[in-house]
Image: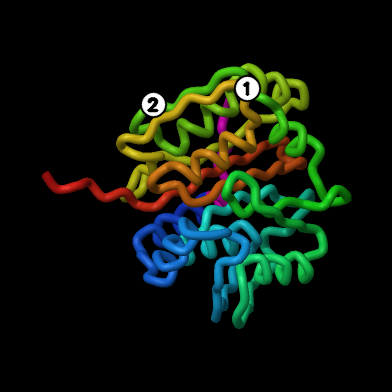
Amino acid sequence: MRRLKTSFWFAICITVSLLMLAESTVGQSIAVQAKKGDLAQMPIENVMLEEEGIVQLLSRFSFVYNIPVGLEVARGDDQSSIYRIEFKKGTLSDLFTQFVTEHKEYSWKIEDGVITVFPKEDYRDPILRELLKTKIRSFSVPEKTTTMMFGEKLLSSPEIERILDLYGLTYDTGYIGGFYIQQLGQQYSFHASNAELRSILNKVIKESPVGQNWVISNDTSARKLSLRVNVRLEYSQKL
């Protein structure tokens, strides 16, 4: 299937690449706490982020605070709108409850150890809802798989491809280029059977040593599905 390039997604790739270089001590501290207790009750404070579009905002939040985040973009969401998080002190649950209160089209939950932000039913794209719930009979990822190839393999699986063909959708999973080719991990591999698309995405960003967040959206005017999995920079271990 043909992949279509857009300047919007190119800008996101550049932003994500820059964020991967910034190892935040705050994010590392929160990550340690996440392993010790309940993700929802993790303390967090003094969060002040502002970006153009919810995709950019939650991707940045995920990288800065080292929190696995999955995002299903609402139907018709204007990615040129300014989104922000201004949060003084509380838990992750408090932060995301405040966020969805300010943005009525979204809700949130913790699923598979991942903070998942998704549209309420009135704002949900029915194709995305169907795709994320679709079970893939057999899916494997070998070592050194790039994020782009991971997305392509997911969307070209027979169960998913059938739905894309039914609705006449093309897709876009990213680009190879820049100063770093994103991989899921030099030594990361897995196999899943009869797993929903959403569960596979959650599994990768939760279990991969560098996995960070995933984003899925549907541009109905262009009839194009976009899927991104973003990871941190993986440094080679010294011999």
Task: Report x, y in % for residue 70.
Answer: 61, 49
* Residue 120 is a magenta residue: no
User: Residue at the location (57% across, 59% down)?
Assistant: 39
Q: Which mark is residue 88?
A: none
Query: Mark 1: which secondary structure?
Result: strand
The outermost residue toward the left is 239
Closest to the camera, between mark 1 and mark 2, is 1
Q: In the rendered view, how is the structure colored?
A: rainbow
Res 135 quadrant in image: top right
Quarter of the rendering occupied by the C terminus: top left
The three-letter amino acid code for the residue at tag 1 is Asn
Q: Tell me where residue 110 appears, x and y as whole percent.
A: 65, 52
Whether residue 83 is visible to the viewer of this picture, yes or no, is no
**Residue at the front extreme of this rendering:** 36
Name the residue type under label 2: Pro
Quarter of the image where the N terminus is located: top right
Figure quadrant of residue 147: top left
- Say left or right for 123 vs 150: right
Residue 194 is marked as 1
Q: How packed is label 2: few (under 14 Cα within 10 Å), some, or many (20 or more)?
A: some
Residue interval drawn in magenta: 1-9
Question: Magenta part mainly helix, strand or loop?
Answer: loop
| Whether residue 33 can be seen here | yes
Q: Residue at x 35, y 43 (%)?
A: 181
Residue bearing the label numbered 2: 142
200 left or right, relative to 190: right
- CA separation in Å, label 1 and label 2: 18 Å
Q: Is residue 129 above or below residue 105?
A: above
Element assignment for label 2? loop
Where residue 32 sits: x, y (%)? Answer: 42, 62
Query: Does label 1 or label 2 sit earlier along the sequence?
Result: 2
Where residue 145 sits: x, y (%)? 39, 32
